[in-house]
Image: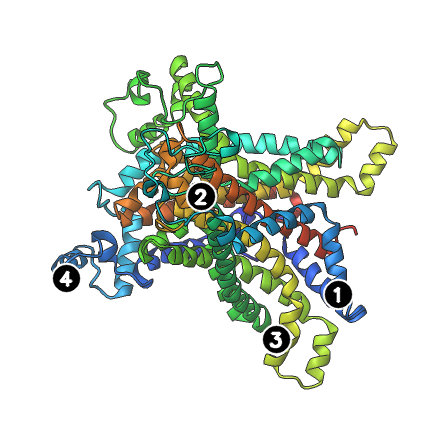
């Protein structure tokens, strides 16, 4: 088992190096002068020369790549042009927002998706099945930004002043103040890496208000997450539901299922224990793969709902031509994707002993 | 052993086994009953409910795109409302349908006017052209490059195969939209650049599909026969393997058009794709986003149009896949 995990991790290394190279190459190899990208098309040659010298762009390309990589391993992602601050600090501040939103959406998508998929497969061609599949087709076809705007219109405009109204933007209502995690735990004097970790966790409002028992703020934070999470969850939800259905249908057609039914096992038990257990593996893979859709969707969702996570950071950087930030976010999302799929593959091996013996 | 197994979203049913089955299935059909292939395939597709609905939606989309100059009452890029002396402040930009009691003396705008006084219905109609063109061209670009890479990798094999496919794996690690944003920022905003970015990001999908189907076709007897007859390797690749590997590519391409339309619209929504005054659905939504509360139709109309187009390609692609995959029950 350990051997499998190690080998799988080792295989990630070349991909990681490739990912770093692609991010580096987009700016340097594609047509388009990084100076113009950063300073605008009308930048003077002198300004460009100064810019190139400052960012080491007049060095040979391999030297540049070497500098880029060694900076990365020191945690230096460069400096934001718009904010004039190290990008790593900006991302540490904002990544928790994205993680919270993505986890929330993924939870909805996983549980609801598997439930819908099982319900459809258990009664093939029933109304539930047809309805679910129609919903799934619709879900993968509606653009995230359109769905987000429709949700805002429905829950913040149509249902305004009813108990079902939901806030359309932001993370907390005006006037709701939460005590930072470090303060609540009496660690405001703490410094160093531990403090960074605590601030990181504290910036996940749902988590930090939950562990410190700030119930009013907790409720407010959750309510603010509902609409963005629904918008973001729709595509993964549809994919998970479809995958669960087709995988379960395949399993339910096998002989041992007929045996189970023949010996009088309750249908419910046949589907959930004999069927779903064996059908779940491909679903786990799809859950890992939907992360790409989730991160792409987070860019649009955060922009629409005004959540300052890394997704909104990248779209804000488009107007400001803040290329280093765009580069850093691209790299971070790819690394997150790699890491999560590494975990998925390892968990796959836990779930299915055949895999690790391969 | 391959690096992280990545299947692009929406193609999760199109795994390597399905690709191989389709490619072999087609080759088998070719050898079994030549001449009936196209008719049989068309029949198989039309038996699928999802393909029927998809085909209907696509027919609507294509008809609208072709007949746009006839259907649209106004020039989509001209501020007709201003020329007619209507004012947004007086609420005259709202939809006006004579049939539903709008005063006859006021010009008819069934979906109202956008912030700049352009007729929204005409823009939605013309937008179908942009979306169709964007989707098909972007995917075409990705398919051509992707299938050459995939076919080369699959046919040549060995070290080249390894290198090419590892590069494709690396590209698949990036969330599509994020990578596309990074590319367009460097290339500069614009519809063509957005298409190039989305196309580049999609290449690995088609490279993988093509490679898988080439690998399955390569081992078939008729290839050995061609080799024995002394046909050149290039001839075998282009005349024997390529045509027989097309089916999975067509399926992936149809589903891919749906994705490309969505992604280019998303880039346009973010201001990186189509630039005003071009009638493109994503940028229309971005333009009037702030009017969501008082004029929701400005967002709903292009939004629904986008959804219908994407749904059409998705459903039709699903139907194609189900009809062409011989492993599924017929």
Which of the 4 image quadrants contains residue A53?
bottom left
Crowding at label 3, few (<14), some or many (≥20) Cα neighbours within 10 Å? some
Q: Residue at horizontal 24%, vertical 66%?
A: A60
Figure colour scheme: rainbow
Q: How many marks?
A: 4
Q: In front: mark 2 or mark 1? A: 1
Residue B11 visible to an observer of this rendering: no
Residue B146 visible to an observer of this rendering: yes
Residue under pointer 1: B37
Q: Secondary structure at mark 4?
A: helix
Q: Secondary structure at mark 2?
A: helix
Q: Residue A265 location, x and y as percent?
A: 82, 28
Residue under pointer 4: A45
Q: Residue A300 location, x and y as percent?
A: 41, 39
Mark 4 on the same chain as mark 1 = no
Q: Residue A97 location, x and y as percent?
A: 38, 32
Mark 2 on the same chain as mark 4 = yes
**Above or below — where is A247 with respect to A69?**
above
Q: Secondary structure at mark 1?
A: helix
Q: Residue at horizontal 44%, vertical 55%?
A: B198
Give the spatial CA distance, label 3 vs label 2: 37 Å
Crowding at label 1, few (<14), some or many (≥20) Cα neighbours within 10 Å? some
Q: Residue at horizontal 37%, vertical 48%?
A: A330
Badge 4 sits on which subunit? A
Left or right placement of residue B210 versus residue A156 in this view: right
Residue under pointer 2: A296
Q: Secondary structure at mark 3?
A: helix
Residue under pointer 3: B237
């Amino acid at each position: 088992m350990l051997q499998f995990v190690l080998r799988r991790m080792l295989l990630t290394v070349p991909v990681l190096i490739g990912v770093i190279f692609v991010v580096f190459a987009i700016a340097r190899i594609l047509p388009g002068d990084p100076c113009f990208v950063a300073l605008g098309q009308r930048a003077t040659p002198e300004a460009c020369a100064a810019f190139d010298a400052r960012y080491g762009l007049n060095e040979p390309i391999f030297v540049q790549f070497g500098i880029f990589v060694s900076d990365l391993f020191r945690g230096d992602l460069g400096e934001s042009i718009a904010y004039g601050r190290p990008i790593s600090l900006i991302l540490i501040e904002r990544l928790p927002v994205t993680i919270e939103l993505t986890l929330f959406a993924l939870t909805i998508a996983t549980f609801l998706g598997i439930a819908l998929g099982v319900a459809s497969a258990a009664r093939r061609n029933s109304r539930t099945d047809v309805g679910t599949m129609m919903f799934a087709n619709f879900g993968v076809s509606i653009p995230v930004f359109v769905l987000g705007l429709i949700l805002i219109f429905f829950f913040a405009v149509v249902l305004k002043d009813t108990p079902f109204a939901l806030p359309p933007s932001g993370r907390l209502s005006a006037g709701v103040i939460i005590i930072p995690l470090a303060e609540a735990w009496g660690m405001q004097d703490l410094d160093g890496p531990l403090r960074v970790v605590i601030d990181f966790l504290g910036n996940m409002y749902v988590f930090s208000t939950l562990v410190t028992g700030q119930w009013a703020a907790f409720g407010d934070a959750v309510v603010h997450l509902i609409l963005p999470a629904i918008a973001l969850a729709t595509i993964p939800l549809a994919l998970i539901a479809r995958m669960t259905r087709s995988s379960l249908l395949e399993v339910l057609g096998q002989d041992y299922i007929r045996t189970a039914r023949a010996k009088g096992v309750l249908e419910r038990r046949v589907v959930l224990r004999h069927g779903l257990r064996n059908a779940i593996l491909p679903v786990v893979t799809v859950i890992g793969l939907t992360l790409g859709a989730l991160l792409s969707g987070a860019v649009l969702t955060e922009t629409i709902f005004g959540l300052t996570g890394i997704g909104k950071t990248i779209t804000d950087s488009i107007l400001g031509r803040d290329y280093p930030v765009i580069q850093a976010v691209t790299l971070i999302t790819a690394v997150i994707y790699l890491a999560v799929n590494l975990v998925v593959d390892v968990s796959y091996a836990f779930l299915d002993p055949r895999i690790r013996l391969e | 052993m391959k690096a992280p197994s990545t299947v692009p979203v929406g193609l999760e049913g199109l795994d390597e086994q399905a690709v191989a089955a389709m490619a072999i299935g087609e080759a088998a059909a070719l050898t079994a009953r030549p001449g009936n292939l196209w008719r049989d395939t068309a029949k198989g597709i039309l038996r699928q409910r999802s393909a029927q609905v998809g085909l209907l939606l696509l027919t609507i989309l294509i008809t609208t795109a072709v007949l746009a100059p006839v259907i649209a009452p106004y020039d989509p890029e001209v501020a007709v409302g201003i020329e007619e002396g209507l004012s947004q402040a007086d609420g005259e930009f709202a939809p006006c349908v004579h049939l539903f009691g709008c005063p006859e003396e006021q010009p008819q705008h069934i979906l109202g006017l956008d912030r700049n006084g352009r007729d929204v219905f005409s823009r939605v109609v013309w937008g179908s052209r942009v979306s169709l063109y964007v989707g098909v061209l972007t995917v075409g670009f990705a398919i051509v490059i992707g299938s050459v890479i995939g076919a080369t990798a699959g046919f040549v094999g060995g070290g080249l195969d390894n290198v090419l496919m590892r590069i494709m794996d690396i590209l698949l690690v990036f969330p599509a939209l994020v990578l596309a944003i990074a590319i367009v920022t460097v290339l500069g905003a614009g519809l063509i650049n957005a298409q190039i970015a989305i196309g580049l990001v999609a290449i690995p999908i088609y490279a993988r599909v093509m490679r898988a189907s080439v690998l399955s076709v390569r081992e078939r007897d008729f290839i050995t026969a061609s080799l024995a007859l002394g046909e050149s390797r290039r001839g075998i690749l282009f005349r024997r393997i390529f045509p027989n590997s097309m089916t999975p590519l067509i399926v992936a391409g149809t589903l891919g058009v749906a994705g490309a339309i969505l992604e280019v619209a998303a880039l346009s929504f973010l201001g990186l794709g189509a630039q005003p005054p071009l009638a493109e659905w994503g940028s229309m939504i971005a333009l009037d986003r702030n009017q969501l509360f008082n004029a929701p139709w400005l967002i709903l109309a292009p939004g629904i149009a986008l959804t219908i187009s994407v749904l059409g390609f998705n459903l039709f692609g699903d139907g194609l896949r189900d009809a062409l995959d011989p492993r599924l029950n017929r």
